[in-house]
Amino acid sequence: MFSEDKHGCASMPPTESQVLSGRELAALWARRLPAEDFGPESDNPYVALDLEGSDPGLGAWLENLPCPVVGIGEGALAPSCDVVIHDRKTLVGIARNIAASPIAAMVLVQHLRASAGLSPSQALTAESFAYATVQTGPEFRRWHLAHASPVAHPTQGGTPLLIVREGDVLRITLNNPARRNAIGVEMRDALVEALELALIDPSIKSVEINASGACFSIGGDVAEFAQVSDPATAHWIRTLRLPARSVMQLADRLWVRVNGAAIGAGVEIACFAKRVTATADAWFQLPELNYGLIPGAGGTVSLPRRIGRQRTAYMALSMRRVPASTALRWGLVDAIEE
């Protein structure tokens, strides 16, 4: 069941999607393993447990482990887990992704645990700190070195946004369909300026955001991920120019209409809105772990407040697409549009 680690203690082999029974979990706890035996550079990059039959008294210990905790099934320990799934097959992909980016996975779940008790504004600041941490970490550097830095693409065919005022309604359309509405610096700054207009004009009673082309947005422009030289400057820029801060202030007046894919920043920004609707073919995804990153456009703030911490962690750790039907059932969107 277990292998012997460098301290002569039992541990889970990282290549197997091992699920601990209640008795095995209690035995692992009883060994009083040090924190370094869990998380990155350990034999336990995650802990997976069968919730049925597990001792609820181990909740505080699980909540302080420096690695993702995945519960399977139902049981009293479910609130202490970072992710709760219903079958072992789902664990395979999650385990593989954690093993590929254990530092980012660790930072993600630790941040989600901590930010749950913060105000949205405070949580957004904490997210920026966490994102800056992984942005200069070895996993992102490895991804960046393995991919020749592409050149950022300016908007093709005109302005990155179409802005129309109709009475007391301001309509904003993401308008770079050739790049699938990737949110690069040009579109980001234009979006912030448009949202600031709505914030300072009390006669604007409603703001609608939609997108031209086949999809809402594929998220941040990967060509720009490593352009900032240091994490402190990156945090400063996000503090000033992150659309999420303006979207958060406009939430009660905001309606986001998603068509096609909403990936990364696309879904992160959308989920701040009071009303989010989607076409039947829409889907949502958080793929940042693939780059050794975590959501950094507000998603660790907006998504948990719509679908909860555990489903947010599931989306980020599994990187699976969530179809519109599931998004509606979870509350990620409020309605499906014809």
Image (cartoon, grey):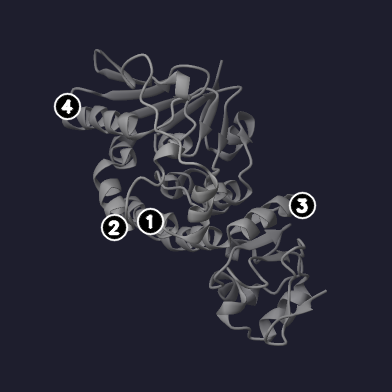
Q: Residue at x 70, y 80 (%)?
A: 28
Between 71 and 238, the one nearer to me in the picture: 238
Question: Between disc 1 and disc 3, whose residue precedes?
Answer: 3
Q: Is residue 256 left or right of residue 72?
A: left
Q: Residue at x 51, y 31 (%)?
A: 262
Q: State the SS at label 2.
A: helix
The answer to whether residue 49 is above or below residue 181 is: below
* Mark 1 crowdedness (10 Å alpha carbons): few <14, some 14-19, many ≥20: many
Residue 132: image tag = 1
State the CA–CA distance, disc 4 to disc 1: 33 Å
Residue for badge 2: 232
* Mark 4 crowdedness (10 Å alpha carbons): few <14, some 14-19, many ≥20: few
State the CA–CA distance, disc 1 to disc 3: 34 Å
Give the residue type that dot 2 points to. Answer: Ala
- Find out whether the residues at labels 1 and 2 contact each other: C-beta distance under 8 Å: yes
Q: Position of residue 279 (x, y in %)?
A: 55, 21
Mark 2 vs mark 3: in front: 2
State the CA–CA distance, disc 2 to disc 4: 32 Å
Q: Residue at x 72, y 58 (%)?
A: 72
The answer to whether residue 338 is above or below residue 298 is: above
State the CA–CA distance, disc 1 to disc 2: 7 Å
Question: Between disc 4 and disc 3, whose residue precedes?
Answer: 3
Mark 4 vs mark 1: in front: 1
Between 231 and 32, the one nearer to me in the picture: 231
- Find out whether the residues at labels 1 and 3 contact each other: C-beta distance under 8 Å: no
Give the residue type that dot 4 points to. Answer: Asp
Q: Position of residue 331 (x, y in %)?
A: 54, 38
Question: Between disc 4 and disc 1, whose residue precedes?
Answer: 1
Residue for badge 4: 201
Q: Is residue 220 visible?
A: no
Residue for badge 3: 87
Mark 2 vs mark 4: in front: 2
